[in-house]
Amino acid sequence: MEDLLKRLTDMLGKQLDDPCFDRFVQELGETPEILCDSKSMREFSFKDSGIYVSMDKRQNQIKSVFLHLSTAGVEAGSIAPYKGNLPSGITPEDNRATVKKRLATKPRSQRIQGRTKADPKDYWEYYSIGPLELTFIFDGATKRMDALSIHYTIDTAPPEPPPPDPETYLQDRCSSSMLKTMAFAQSEARRLKHNFIGSEFLLLGLLGESQSISSSALGSVGVTLEKAREEVEKIIGRGESRVGNKIPYTYGAKRVLALALEQATKLDRELMDDAHLLLGLIECGEGVGSRVLENLQVDAESLRKDVLMRASKSL
């Protein structure tokens, strides 16, 4: 397809019922795989073209595209590298300085973070061009360009404030069983050698407390620690880096914990427990933790009602 990048960026910001996506699929000639279809997000993968497309159901927008150039998925052969054109004549061989020169502007911000949780030394550089935010990801060792994410930044709804740092309230607002859940989540992150705790490890932490409300509710719908571990490893794999003494939370995990705190407040409980955490995970409706539940064929609304019923009986 000629000028593939323009066809992709033209879709960004369009409403979900706009026929542009269906036309794109037809012209590309590749049937996409649905990676996620939660209450808030829908994500598609074009594995033969190296493209991910993300849709935001809450804002009714086609929100972002992710282009695989030399990612771990490309190296493993699970997805083909993106072969289309890039903005401003940029090529996958360009380094950070060349990209800056071609775009004729400075990055809006930059940080060091891995493209996966196991690789924390990649360079991420953010450029704002009109309504689009371009995120270039460069391999920290080879300096090569690994990926480009293009995000539509003009929202139809006000942005959510960032979730608070869990370290500011966990010790004071967690029950003893909740603290055990969080400790198990950390041990699971270490077991898979990941340097961040995401929502998937919070889910494993819930399943690690076998006598808890959440573990019982999850078990009643066929979700066991062994099955969840298998799904988590399928999605994020095992890391190879050394795990530090203190493992930080991802943005998604912080959001789940903030929602759990809200659930505790709504239910007039001073301390968070495992039931509140599972309710927060369900309400969040996105991230790897939610994807694991979807892959295991869990009806989120039925599970939510069951957790609330079990929690009310425990009072």
Image (spheres, helix red, strand yellow):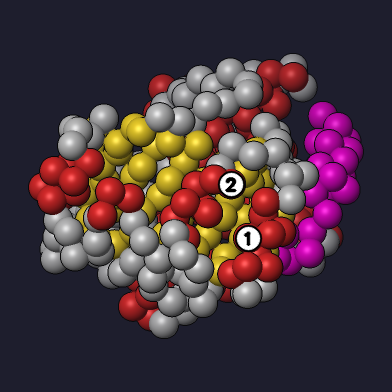
For residue 24, which numbered disc appears in the image?
Answer: 1
Q: Is residue 162 visible?
A: yes
270 versus 170 height, above or below: above
For residue 11, which numbered disc appears in the image?
Answer: 2
Magenta residues, start to end: 294-315
Residues tagged 2 and 1 counted as in contact (Cβ below 8 A): yes
Q: Is residue 173 left or right of residue 285?
A: left
Which quadrant of the figure has residue 160? Answer: top right
Residue at left 30%, top 38%?
Answer: 126
Which quadrant of the figure has residue 31? Answer: bottom right
Residue 65 rendering spot, x and y as whole percentages: 50, 52
Q: Is residue 233 left or right of residue 203?
A: left
Question: Does the magenta segment cover residue 301?
Answer: yes
Give the residue type at disc 2.
Met
Residue 291 rendering spot, x and y as whole percentages: 64, 57
As measured in the structure, the alpha-carbon distance from the residue carrying label 2 to the one carrying label 1 is 9 Å
Q: Is residue 228 visible?
A: no
Circle 2 SS class: helix
Residue at left 71%, top 59%?
Answer: 22
Give the residue type at disc 1.
Phe
Q: Pick the residue in front: 186 or 157.
A: 157
